[in-house]
Amino acid sequence: MSNWTIRTEKYEKKRIAENGNRFLIGNGYMGIRGTLEEHTKAYLPAVNLAGIYDKVGDKWREPLNAPNGLKTWVCVDGQYFGLPETEPSEHVQTLDFRRAVHSRETTWRTPKGKITIQSLRFCSMENLHLLAMEWCVWADFEASVDIYSGIDADVWDINGPHYAKLDLNEMNGVLCATGYTSEGQAVSTAEGIRLQFEAHSDVLISEQEIVRKISFSAEPDRKYTIQKTAAVYTSKDTADYRKKAISEVEAALEYSFEESLAAHEKAWEKIWASSTVTIQGDEKAEHAVNYSLYHLNSIAPRHADNLSVSARGLSGQTYKGAVFWDTELFVLDFFLNTNPKVARSLVQYRIETLPGALDKAREYGCDGAFYAWESQEGGFDACTDFNVVDVFTGRPMRTHFRDKQYHISAAVVYGIVEYYNRTGDMDILISGGFNVIIECAKFYYSLIYKKLDDVAYSLLDVVGPDEYHERVNNNGYTNRMAKFNFESAVWALSVLSEQQMAQAAKDEADCLIEKFKAAADSIFIAQPDENGIIEQFDGYMKLEDISVADLKKRLLDEKEYWGGAYGIASGTKIAKQADVVAWLSLFPNDFPKAVMKENYLYYMDRTEHGSSLSASMFAGVACRCGMPNSAYPLFMKSACVDLKGGGKQWAGLIYIGGTHPAAAGGAYKTLVYGFGGLHFDGETVTAKPNFPDNWERLRFRVWHQGKLYEVDETKQNTTIKLLSV
Ligand code: IFM
């Protein structure tokens, strides 16, 4: 029986931020950080919302955190008991990630006796606007108890405060806090409780908080339980956000806590029915992968048909809640395989944000579509020209993520093509997908450059996924992706030409086909040198060859940024994540296995893995080279990033902690494609085990072309069964 929980049995103040990510619960609409009910904003609690943003002054635009409807704390005989202020004698925090239920139990031993609080909460997967919690307190002595429970609108923000105005009020026993942003959006949290005992209750309203004070005399060893329900609605959901939040709470209070919990658990069971992974022979890996998939399932935008997922999921405002290339290259496959409707939403988001990409291309004097590096709604690029803060001067540093990471447009195209290959959904292509592919190809076409004497076209002045080396020429990954984009556009235009089309449009399509064919054929694609090594970009081989360990010794400050003009890595071969390996992981048939292996080994020694995306790309290539045992630690590194509360926490002085959907998705891809050898060819699904030594059996389900399959592999035998749905 697999272990579906994570647990911590001690309370460490220094791990509050990390535990906020590890113990997160979410349902795609919102994510509730795994902080404790009594926590004020100093401890980073958040009810982080998907797809709604705000900008304050000239600070970064970021997603909103809703007023916190879970806020609850207790005073016993006039003394506050809560963490971290009052040191506990016992503390247990648990996440049951099969049921998506968070719980905690904390005990204090006082001269009068023991006091314990306990809570259990969930973010409903059945009704995505609802949060519910059962909270109780008991003491083994007679005591006078005050429970304070309500809504805290003094929310944690990185670049806030976002609520320029707050309305706090109570009606018929339901509390409501509505925040109005300077961009004209509003967020309402309503909250209601069920009391399981007799008490005196008052509503207290302060500037940023509305709470009930529930006072009673507690008998020794009797549990006093409150059941709380909160609902969140925003002005993006409905014009009646406040009314809706209140009526949702009233409706939910008609049901018992147990009934709401059961409905939530049932919804999760359905999700797990298509996404559980079983690994016989390796419980640790099975636990880590399913935990990673829990996080992906918790951020899936099931409630929308045009939303995507952000680089730190719903764990807070890090990375501005923006969508990166992470979605298409690391996360999309999980949803293609387990929930194609969600995959469609991720793709549709890009189709609908094309206008933003067209504008961005114009801004830089280019044709076509240049997608946002950090994409918010409408394709708005939240990335700034100064995206890192220098630790020494405290000044923003000029970086070129926004204006030179051209590879983002081709990543969007890659996602659309993948989605089509896996679903056969021609509608999405006709209704916008083809257009994106063509516009992105036009973008690269307007960038490629050739001197009179050159044979090939170059792509100059770019930043590849290895962000430490800025403004380089002919970055291997970017050029290869541009070639892919040109080829995809030729296909798109050919399909469109076969449709009913006016002669002028046909002529235009023919002309573009010719241009893109020529571009695909003549863009520079680096080839292996005499040792089989592919140069990451022009001139890379001339850079200083140094080990990561030796380079690290040059750091003057542990938070120092490694890239940019003065970064310690810039003049060396050390990459943040290896672009050539990224290339090979996507196009494994470009070169023979021996070349792949040489490059894997070469770049492994020269990669810092400063991005949580890096390890899974290496793992995928190791599997392709027939080295599953070498892939294994890299796979586990990706699968365990959030489990261990790892990943980089700082880029210069910018906090970048949170959950890591791309690492989770990358681990999943390594599992099914790398170790499971899963392969799709037209309608056909095949799998060929390529297991690490200790694995005995691997089982998972995948959707392909509208059909659901169960893949069951042992080292000797593979069965792929079509399931009836
Ligand atoms: O998209 C990545 C990028 O490749 C490296 N820095 C973090 C981003 C978000 O995960």
Image: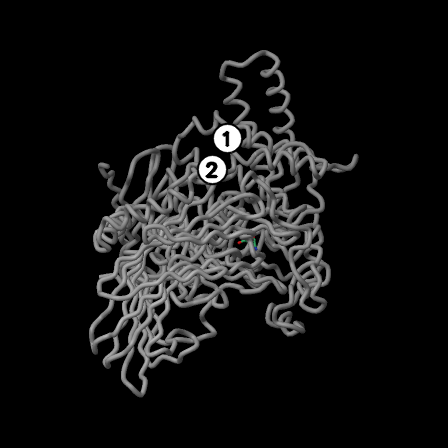
Residue 339 at x, y percent in the picture = 35, 42
Helix, strand or loop for disc 1? helix
Image quadrant containing the C terminus: top left
State left or right for residue 310 relative to residue 364: left
Tell me, for residue 52, which label it has, or none: none
- Is residue 690 something one can see in this rendering? no
Mark 2 beta carbon near ligand 1 (under 8 Å): no
x 42%, y 36%: residue = 305
Looking at the image, tell me whether mark 2 or mark 1 is earlier in sequence order. 2
Closer-to-camera residue (638/118) = 118
Residue matched to label 1? 433
Q: Are marks 2 and 1 in contact (CB under 8 Å)?
A: yes
Residue 240 at x, y percent in the picture = 42, 39
Does 263 sit above or below residue 7?
above
Residue matched to label 2? 347
x 22%, y 70%: residue = 223
Helix, strand or loop for disc 2? helix
